[in-house]
Image (cartoon, grey):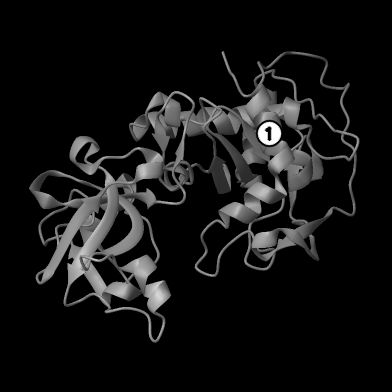
C-alpha cells in the first residue's frame, strides 16, 4: 500500500501493470479510509476510480477561484455517507468548517469527473492559483510531472494573479546535471558560471539564456566553503536553525565542484528548463502551465528546515517566504522568446 502519493504517472503504470494489479483509491482520515477506488482490469491510470458503495460524492463550486462545477466540471470534492466522520470530538466550531448544513464533508481537494464516473484529483483547493489571463494552475500536478526529470531532485512551482506564467524553484540532481554540462562543453558550448556578491547564483541570470561559444579557459568559480542557510520556523517564517548546505562533490572539467557551484551556471538552468518543457508536452500540459523561469538552489527541502511537511509535501508557505525575493525576480525576468 502506498499512502500520500500522487496518481501514478504513465511510465510507472506501464511497468507496474506488467507485474501486478495496482488499484488507486482516494480517501482521508475524516472519511475513515477510501471513498473511491479503481477497478480490476482498469489499467488506464490517471484517476482514482468511481465512488465506493454507501458514499455520495459531488463537486462543489469554489467561489474564490470562480469555479462552477456544473460549468467547468471541476470543484471541491465533497462526500456524504456512513463512512464519513460525524465531526471533531467536542469541537462544534471546527466541525462546521468541515461539514456543511446538508451533511456534505468538504475535503479541501479539487477534482474533476472523467468518463464512467471516475474521479481525478487535481490539487489541494488552497494550492491552486489563478494567472493574469484567467487560467487556473494546479502546481502539484505540474511538480509531479516535472519530478520525473533526471535533473530534478525537488521542485516547487508558484505563480499569482498578476503574472501570465508560473515559475519554479529547483533543487537539481547534481550527478546528472554535471554530466549534462560536461556533454554540453564537449559539443563546444561554453560553461560560464555567474556569481552574485553573495557567491550564489544571480537570479536574473537563471533565466535560461542562449548558449554562446567563448574561450573556455576564461572562466572561474568562486569557492564558497561555508554555505549555511537559515530555515524559517513554522508558518510565521521567522528564522530557525542554521542548516548546512549539501556537501556532495561532482566532477566537471576535471575538477571537483559542489552542487552550489553547479547552480551558478546559466547553462544548467537551460538544460533543466528544456527537459521540463519536453516532459510537460509529453504529459499534455497546456502552454500556460509550463514554467517560464527557474531558480536553482543547493539546499534540499526537508522536514528539518521546515520546507517539507511531515508527510513529505512541499511546505508551500514556508518555501514562498524563504525565496520570495528570488521568485519576484523570476517573475520580472521570466518572459522567454
| Left or right of 252, for residue 140 | left
Work out whether 293 lies above or below 124. Answer: above
x then y, percent, for residue 228? 84, 56
Circle 1 packing at 10 Å, graded few (<14), some (14-19), many (20+), is some
Residue 183 visible in the picture: no
Q: What residue is disc 1 on?
A: 328
Q: Position of residue 152 (x, y in %)?
A: 56, 45
Q: Picture coordinates of residue 59 (x, y %)?
A: 23, 51
Image quadrant where one finds the N terminus: bottom left
Residue appearing at x 18%, y 40% in the figure: 70
Assign a secondary structure to mark 1.
helix
Drawn side of residue 297 relative to residue 159, left or right? right
Which of these two is toward me, 238 or 218? Answer: 238
What residue is shown at x 24% (from left), y 75% (from top)? 84
Find the residue positioned furthest to the bottom: 90
Q: Is residue 269 visible?
A: yes
Q: Residue at x 37, y 80 (%)?
A: 88
Amino acid at each position: 500500500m502506498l499512502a500520500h502519493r500522487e496518481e501514478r504517472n504513465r511510465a510507472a503504470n506501464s511497468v507496474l501493470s506488467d507485474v501486478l494489479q495496482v488499484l488507486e483509491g482516494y480517501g482521508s482520515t475524516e472519511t475513515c479510509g477510501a471513498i473511491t477506488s479503481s477497478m480490476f482490469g482498469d489499467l488506464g491510470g490517471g484517476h482514482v476510480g468511481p465512488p465506493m458503495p454507501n458514499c455520495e460524492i459531488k463537486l462543489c463550486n469554489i467561489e474564490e477561484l470562480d469555479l462552477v462545477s456544473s460549468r467547468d466540471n471541476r470543484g471541491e470534492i465533497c462526500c456524504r455517507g456512513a463512512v464519513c466522520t460525524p465531526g471533531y470530538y467536542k469541537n462544534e466550531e471546527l466541525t462546521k468548517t468541515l461539514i456543511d448544513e446538508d451533511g456534505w464533508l468538504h475535503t479541501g481537494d479539487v477534482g474533476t469527473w472523467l468518463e464512467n464516473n471516475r474521479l481525478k484529483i487535481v490539487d489541494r483547493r488552497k494550492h491552486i492559483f489563478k494567472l493574469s489571463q484567467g487560467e487556473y494552475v494546479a502546481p502539484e500536478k505540474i511538480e509531479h510531472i516535472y519530478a520525473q526529470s533526471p535533473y530534478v531532485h525537488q521542485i516547487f512551482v508558484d505563480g499569482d494573479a498578476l503574472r501570465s506564467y508560473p515559475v519554479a524553484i529547483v533543487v537539481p540532481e547534481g550527478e546528472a546535471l554535471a554530466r549534462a554540462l560536461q556533454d554540453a562543453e564537449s559539443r563546444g558550448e561554453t560553461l560560464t558560471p555567474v556569481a552574485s556578491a553573495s557567491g550564489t547564483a544571480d537570479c536574473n541570470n537563471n533565466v535560461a539564456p542562449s548558449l554562446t561559444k567563448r574561450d573556455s579557459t576564461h572562466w572561474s568559480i568562486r569557492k564558497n566553503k561555508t554555505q549555511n542557510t537559515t530555515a524559517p520556523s513554522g508558518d510565521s517564517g521567522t528564522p530557525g536553525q542554521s542548516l548546512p548546505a549539501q556537501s556532495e562533490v561532482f566532477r566537471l572539467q576535471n575538477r571537483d565542484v559542489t552542487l552550489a557551484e553547479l547552480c551558478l551556471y546559466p547553462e544548467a538552468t537551460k538544460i533543466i528548463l528544456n527537459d521540463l518543457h519536453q516532459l510537460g508536452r509529453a504529459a499534455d500540459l497546456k502552454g500556460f502551465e509550463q514554467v517560464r523561469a527557474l531558480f536553482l538552489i543547493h539546499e534540499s527541502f526537508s522536514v528539518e528546515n521546515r520546507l517539507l511537511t511531515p508527510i513529505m509535501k512541499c511546505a508551500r508557505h514556508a518555501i514562498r517566504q524563504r525565496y520570495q525575493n528570488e521568485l519576484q525576480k523570476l517573475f520580472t525576468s521570466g518572459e522567454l522568446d
